[in-house]
Image (cartoon, rainbow, N blue to C red):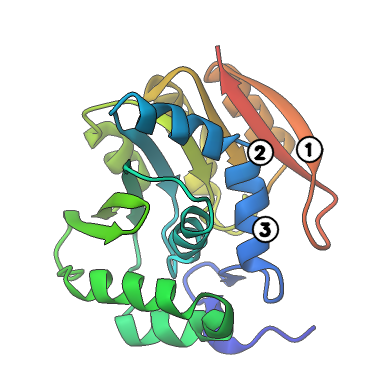
Amino acid sequence: MQIPAYLVNEQFDDRYFDVVNALDEAQQIYFSNNHLLERIQERAAAGSRFIIGETGFGAGRVVVSLLEYLEKSGLKNVLIEYHSVELHPMSPERMHDILDGFKERAGAEINTLIEAYRRMDITMPGWHCVSVEKAFGTIELNLWIGEALEMVEALEKPCDAWFLDGHSPKKNPSIWRPELMAEIGKKTVRDGTCSTFTVSSSVRNALGEAGFTLQKLPGCGGKKEVLQGTRR
């Protein structure tokens, strides 16, 4: 399948996501594999927040997927801190064009994200924080404009779950380097989790050294296997 040019990150010569199954892929790899609903529900019942870290904001498709996932969950009083990073932020207009293919399925969620994104001054490095209020509760979206290791080091609290993205290890090796994975391990709660589409041996080794116990799980779409880890 020919990938449309607007779906390719010109810095890394890699597509932002699977053209057909991008939302389903995110919900399987990052949400189901991390048992996200049950864990978020436990926190909501206790009146506390669930903290997510993501390496690679891109066009925000994982946020859109999470909004859709939670809207359908029936959960209430959810509070999520969502920390992500983007070294090469795109314009809101390009984000709209990239996500437009999902508008029939998740049009309201896409509009919510783009509206929040427009409130950020993406020309300035560092943290940009906006709150998204929905029927299920609140997502505090904290986007770091800059390098991933800087973002992880800047986190004041460890995360409950990590969504490791940011293009393939061959296309963008810096976002999979061992020192970044080690810092992610340090910024993960005990029994916290991580998940990613790649099963690269270099990534498995780095995450293992960072303290994660790893397992391969079935992939989504044309991907045979994906990776999930638990911090022990």
Residue linked to disc 2: 33
Q: Are marks 3 and 1 in contact (CB under 8 Å)?
A: no
Amino acid type at circle 2 is Asn
Name the quadrant of the C terminus.
top right
The residue closer to the viewer here, 134 or 63, is 134
- Which three-letter amino acid code belongs to the residue tagged 3? Glu
Q: In this rendered view, identify the residue nearer to me: 43 or 228.
A: 43
CA neighbours of label 3 inside 10 A, class few (<14), some (14 to 19), many (20+): many
Total marks in image: 3
- Asked if marks 1 and 2 touch (Cβ < 8 Å), the reply is yes
Can you identify the residue that label 1 sits on?
217
Q: CA distance from mark 2 to mark 3?
A: 11 Å
Q: Is residue 24 left or right of residue 86?
A: right
| Quarter of the rendering containing residue 188 | top left
Q: Position of residue 131 (x, y in %)?
A: 21, 56
Determine the residue positioned at 35% across, 67% down. Answer: 88
Q: Determine the CA span between mark 1 and mark 2.
A: 8 Å
The earlier-in-sequence mark between 3 and 1 is: 3
Observer able to see residue 100:
yes
What residue lies at 58% left-to-right and 77% top-to-bottom? 105
Q: Is residue 146 above or below residue 95?
A: above
Q: Position of residue 123 (x, y in %)?
A: 17, 71
- Sequence-first disc among 2 and 3: 3
For mark 1, give the secondary structure: strand
User: Would you name the residue on which mark 3 appears?
Assistant: 25
